[in-house]
């Protein structure tokens, strides 16, 4: 029986909740030696220069942008929300920058960070909106709903879910959507009519990646990664040793790359065979960026938090950059890195900064901010970065004069 769509005429009911967490697994060796990886390969062709419309820039979650990073980055504008920001900015209708906040609101901002619209969803929002071709936006909220907004931010529809909708939706090639909420993976039409719902063994915080033909790959807190066919049948399952909260990424050849709370990053073939596994010594909860030079770049938690690059074919460590901070297992990198048109990277770190890194891990710039950067940055144009911060502020970073203060 299909859940009914609810037409929203008022703000959604609020209800704060906390994410349950199991006790951390026993410590594992944190010192991972650098391996001798293969010689660098020719760069992959970057994607077209288009504004980001969804989490990780595409349904496969590659993290690749067709724009370049700023060369001499400065904060050019900012807007203050009333809660932490852990989502990624996207660009909606009329070139509006759309950002969600833990204050329960979705914000539409102009390029100068002035407010165009604001809508309250009724509870905290962890997720990144998906902007559809007609300008409508779909996002999940802790009010146990997937919400559809109009291009102007107006509330249109909501689908009631069985628990918090804490994952960012992705679209298949036919326009249908995939997202997790509670213990379920959902497939819906573009208008949120439910096609099917697959009940998993535990809560889903992993935002599913989707191939063009509609195969979704998702992790869950039942220590499993699954590939799910367009009709809702499970194609394959890989069992891990702890929660899988990280969003998977899918390569051009169908290989899945995903980290987990067991401290490992895995490469899984399109038919569900584990090709390699690399122990990184701490939780891996960020998404994997598919570099243009055959690297995979991802952040880790402690006891030795860092950003690390692995060889895509072998899992060998190419380079790593430590993040200053306490040697605890709950301190680490939650932000997923982006890859620019030249193959350089931008990633938020808990050392109150946004890092810009070269292909070989060299620090191009450290942009100091007033709080941890757990949200993922987005390039909205050549030389224009937007990122949310734990201080609740949206920062616009570009080449140009510094801004005159917060709005």
Image (spheres, rainbow, N blue to C red):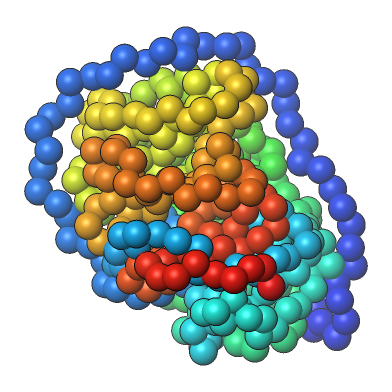
Above or below residue 109? Residue 87 is above
Query: Which of these two is toward me, 315 or 256?
Result: 315
Above or below residue 10? Residue 39 is above
Q: Residue at x 76, y 41 (%)?
A: 19
Judge left or right: residue 50 versus residue 245.
left
Query: Which of these two is toward me, 228 or 276?
Result: 276
Q: Residue at x 80, y 73 (%)?
A: 120
Query: Which of these two is toward me, 361 or 186?
Result: 361
Query: Which of these two is toward me, 405 or 290?
Result: 405
Above or below residue 196? Residue 335 is above
Judge left or right: residue 53 versus residue 1.
left
Quarter of the figure with the C terminus: bottom right
Say how many tags the image has. 0
Judge left or right: residue 277 versus residue 45.
right
Residue 270 screen position, x and y as percent: 32, 44
Quarter of the figure with the N terminus: bottom right
Q: Residue at x 21, y 43 (%)?
A: 294
Residue 30 screen position, x and y as percent: 46, 14
Look at the image and tell me whether residue 188 can be seen.
no
Look at the image and tell me whether residue 209 can be seen.
yes
Residue 353 screen position, x and y as percent: 52, 45
In the rendered image, which quarter is residue 313 located in? top left
Residue 198 screen position, x and y as percent: 62, 52
Q: Residue at x 28, y 51 (%)?
A: 344
């Amino acid at each position: 029986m299909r859940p009914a769509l609810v037409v929203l005429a008022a703000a959604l009911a609020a209800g704060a909740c906390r994410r349950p967490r199991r006790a951390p697994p026993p410590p594992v060796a944190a010192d991972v030696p650098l391996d001798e990886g293969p010689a660098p390969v020719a760069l992959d062709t970057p994607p077209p220069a288009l504004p980001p419309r969804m989490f990780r820039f595409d349904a496969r979650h590659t993290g690749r942008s067709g724009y370049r990073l700023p060369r001499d980055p400065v904060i050019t504008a900012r807007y203050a929300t009333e809660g932490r920001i852990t989502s990624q900015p996207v660009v909606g209708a009329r070139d509006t920058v759309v950002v969600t906040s833990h204050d329960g609101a979705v914000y539409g901002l102009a390029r100068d960070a002035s407010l165009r619209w604001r809508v309250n969803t009724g509870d905290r929002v962890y997720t990144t909106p998906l902007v559809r071709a007609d300008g409508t936006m779909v996002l999940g909220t802790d009010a146990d709903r997937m919400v559809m907004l109009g291009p102007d931010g107006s509330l249109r529809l909501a689908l009631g879910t069985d628990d918090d909708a804490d994952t960012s939706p992705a679209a298949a090639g036919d326009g249908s959507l995939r997202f997790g909420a509670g213990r379920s993976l959902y497939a819906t039409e573009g208008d949120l009519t439910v096609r099917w719902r697959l009940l998993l063994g535990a809560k889903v915080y992993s935002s599913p990646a989707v191939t063009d033909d509609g195969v979704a790959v998702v992790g869950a807190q039942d220590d499993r990664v699954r590939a799910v066919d367009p009709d809702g049948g499970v194609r394959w399952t890989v069992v891990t040793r702890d929660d899988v909260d990280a969003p998977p990424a899918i390569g051009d050849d169908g290989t899945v790359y995903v980290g987990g709370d067991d401290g490992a990053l895995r490469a899984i073939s399109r038919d569900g065979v584990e090709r390699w596994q690399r122990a990184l010594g701490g939780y891996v909860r960020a998404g994997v960026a598919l570099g243009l030079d055959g690297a995979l770049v991802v952040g880790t938690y402690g006891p030795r938090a860092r950003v690390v690059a692995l060889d895509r074919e072998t899992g060998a460590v190419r380079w790593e950059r430590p993040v200053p901070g306490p040697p605890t297992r709950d301190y680490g990198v939650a932000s997923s890195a982006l890859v620019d048109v030249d193959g350089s990277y931008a990633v938020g770190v808990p050392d109150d900064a946004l890092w810009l890194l070269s292909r070989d891990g060299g620090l191009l710039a450290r942009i100091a901010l007033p709080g941890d950067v757990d949200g993922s940055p987005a390039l909205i144009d050549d030389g224009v970065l937007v990122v949310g911060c734990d201080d609740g502020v949206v920062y616009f970073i570009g080449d140009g004069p510094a801004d005159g203060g917060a709005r």
